[in-house]
Amino acid sequence: MTEEQFVQALKEQGIELSDKQQKQFRQYFELLVEWNEKMNLTAITDAPSVYLKHFYDSISAAFYVDFSGRKTICDVGAGAGFPSIPLKICFPELEVTIVDSLNKRIGFLTNLAEELQLDNVQFVHARAEDFGQNLAYRENFDLVTARAVARLSVLSELCVPLVKQGGIFVAMKGAAAEDELADAKKALAVLGAVFKEEHAFTLPVENSERSIFVFDKDKKTPKKYPRKPGVPNKSPIQ
């Protein structure tokens, strides 16, 4: 996907990028490639693939979920900033918090935000399980999202405790999404989330499967969740 195709594809979905926003995506790509030579941020470094598999794929959530206005968003395990930084570029009013367990990635994201002149973004170096027990962040966000972090049964324990009552959890998934949803049914109920809707589509050019699950947070998460670091992955809620 070329930059021109990227801009046009977003326009067809009702997202029109200004010259400034297009420049921010170009800078993002350049910084990603530059920093990737020093540390492992992504295996995908050619421009057409970055624009398709990182930028466009990240923004695809906004085709189905309203990201406009001053919403508070938390991105769990964002790595090199996906999906929240592309969303922030498209919707500058978003207030974004990224939590990641690797300090080097936090360094990259801090530099990225400065270079792209993004405001109302903060980056927290922490394990998601510890972050979810921190009262400064717990049940504090309008929307919590994650992409390519863990199976839904595990991911829900890392994300749902951060969503405020009345907020939503948006999980971005690839193939086998239906199996993950079935496995996560018990965990989601225990954590206080209810399934709202699924949006299935194929990524253009390569036609790979994508699913976006949206869950409403309708009751408070029990205090014991998330459990200690590593526990959700070893023994998901059954």
Image (cartoon, rainbow, N blue to C red):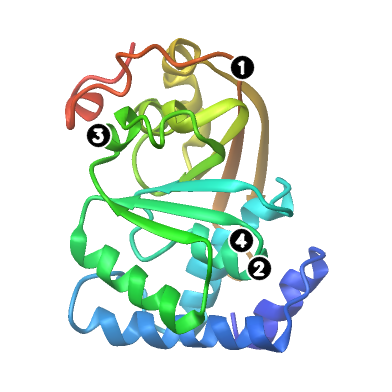
In the rendered image, residue 215, in percent from the top left (x then y), is placed at 60, 28
Mark 4 and 2 residues: CB-CB less than 8 Å, in contact?
yes
Please identify, in this view, whether the residue under mark 3 or under mark 2 is nearer the observer. Answer: 3
Quadrant placement of the C terminus: top left
In the rendered image, residue 31, in percent from the top left (x then y), is placed at 37, 84
Tell whether 223 sits left or right of 56: left
Write down the residue under mark 2. Answer: 90
Element class at badge 4: helix
Q: CA distance from mark 4 to mark 1?
A: 26 Å
Q: Nearer the viewer, residue 211 or 113?
A: 113
Task: Give the number of marks.
Answer: 4
| Residue at image coords 51%, 79% | 117
Write down the residue under mark 3. Answer: 130
Q: CA distance from mark 3 to mark 2?
A: 30 Å
Q: Amino acid at mark 4?
A: Ile
Write down the residue under mark 4. Answer: 59
Q: Earlier in the sequence, mark 4 or mark 1?
A: 4
The image quadrant of residue 3 is bottom right
